[in-house]
Image: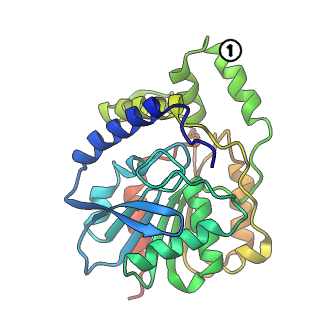
């Protein structure tokens, strides 16, 4: 199995910072590992166990810190499980399965079963959104509803993405922070330029410095697969997403799934942030009365 990090020292730096963040988690929680066929999986559990279950799946080159600004609000009405994906910058195993191997849906099915959940809502970001969609197409009976932030798999990834990143790197004179902020759409300053945002950017930079990225593109779902998604779905994209074609993605999910709410955020890049209230309201409306 190829190494996930560029060095062991770099891995320990990333995980040390992550553990510091976890010690400051914004809501009362339990943190633990659960066994799966793909190694140990790290979970942060919060909220009332009698509330409806909500599973949170972060994106690539990240971990559950992605939900740091959302989890307190979501935990007021849901039993929340923030899960570190395998092969990413969290405390789950370093295993990186092939996207088409069936491993991700099997892994998530094992995780949900270990959590003792029969049906849940799932929120996913980017790669996490792709995994949520993949799981829901295979196990639609186990997914009550989906909230997807810039999910992969609805349209082909942009072919000129790496070229644009190269141009931005040149124009930024090699300043990694400027490049990442532009790619994610975090370079607009204003109200979003908070201590929390700066902390997030510093952590993203640390991860990008030491974690090896995956260059394989996410497979696109067929029309037949998307037509299995009869549960309520919320899809949110930024209209300035460099990685994914937001308009094509929205068109495909609206055309194939019957119960979809879509939102296109103006001036927003691939980092779709601050959606906790929108997700909460959607989940509450989608719950059976």
Residue position for label 1: 170
Question: Which corner quadrant of the image does residue 229 belong to?
Answer: bottom right
**How is this picture coloured?**
rainbow
User: Who's the residue at 52% across and 79% down the image?
Assistant: 143
The residue lying furthest to the top in this view is 173
Asked if residue 102 is positioned above or below residue 250 in the image, the reply reads below
Marker count (numbered) = 1
Question: Which corner quadrant of the image does residue 42 belong to?
Answer: bottom left
The residue lying furthest to the front in this view is 1
Is 253 situated left or right of 191 in this image? right
Q: Is residue 86 visible?
A: yes
Q: Is residue 286 visible?
A: no
Is 177 situated left or right of 154 in this image? left
Asked if residue 228 is positioned above or below residue 5 in the image, the reply reads below
User: Who's the residue at 43% across and 63% down the image?
Assistant: 279
Q: Looking at this view, is 21 or 91 the one in front?
A: 91
Q: Residues within 10 Å of mark 1 (few under 14, many from 20)?
A: few
Q: Looking at this view, is 87 or 270 the one in front?
A: 87
Rendering coords of residue 275 (x, y %): 43, 54
Quarter of the image with the C terminus is: bottom left
Question: Which corner quadrant of the image does residue 224 belong to?
Answer: bottom right
Rendering coords of residue 261 (x, y %): 57, 67
The residue lying furthest to the left in this view is 28
Rendering coords of residue 78 (x, y %): 31, 71
- Label 1: state its secondary structure: helix
User: Who's the residue at 73% across and 64% down the image?
Assistant: 100
Asked if residue 141 is positioned above or below residue 153 in the image, the reply reads below
Q: Looking at this view, is 31 or 232 the one in front?
A: 31
Rendering coords of residue 221 (x, y %): 74, 66
Asked if residue 206 is positioned above or below residue 79 in the image, the reply reads above
User: Who's the residue at 69% across and 58% down the image?
Assistant: 98
């Amino acid at each position: 199995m190829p190494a996930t990090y560029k060095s062991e020292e770099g891995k320990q730096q990333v995980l040390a910072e992550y553990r510091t963040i976890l010690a400051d988690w914004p809501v009362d929680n339990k943190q633990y590992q659960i066994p799966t066929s793909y190694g140990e999986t790290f979970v942060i559990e919060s909220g009332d166990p009698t509330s409806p279950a909500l599973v949170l799946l972060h994106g690539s080159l990240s971990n559950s810190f992605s939900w740091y600004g959302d989890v307190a609000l979501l935990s007021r009405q849901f039993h929340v499980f923030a899960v570190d994906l395998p092969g990413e910058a969290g405390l789950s195993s370093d295993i990186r399965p092939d996207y088409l191997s069936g491993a991700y849906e099997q892994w998530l099915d094992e995780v949900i079963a270990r959590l003792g959940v029969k049906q849940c809502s799932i929120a996913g970001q980017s790669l996490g959104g792709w995994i949520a969609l993949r799981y829901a197409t295979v196990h639609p009976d186990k997914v009550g509803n989906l909230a997807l932030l810039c999910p992969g798999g609805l349209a082909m990834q942009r072919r000129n993405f790496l070229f644009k990143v190269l141009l931005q790197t040149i124009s930024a004179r090699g300043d990694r922070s400027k490049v990442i902020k532009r790619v994610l759409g975090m370079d607009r300053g204003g109200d979003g330029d908070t201590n929390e945002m700066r902390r997030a950017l510093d952590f993203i930079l640390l991860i990008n410095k030491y974690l090896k990225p995956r260059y394989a593109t996410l497979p696109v779902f067929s029309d037949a697969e998307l037509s299995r998604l009869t549960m309520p779905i919320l899809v949110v994209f930024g209209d300035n997403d460099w990685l994914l074609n937001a308009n094509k993605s929205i068109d495909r999910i609206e055309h194939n799934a019957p119960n979809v709410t879509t939102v296109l955020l103006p001036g927003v890049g691939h980092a779709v942030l601050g959606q906790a209230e929108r997700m909460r309201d959607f989940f509450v409306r989608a719950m059976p009365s």
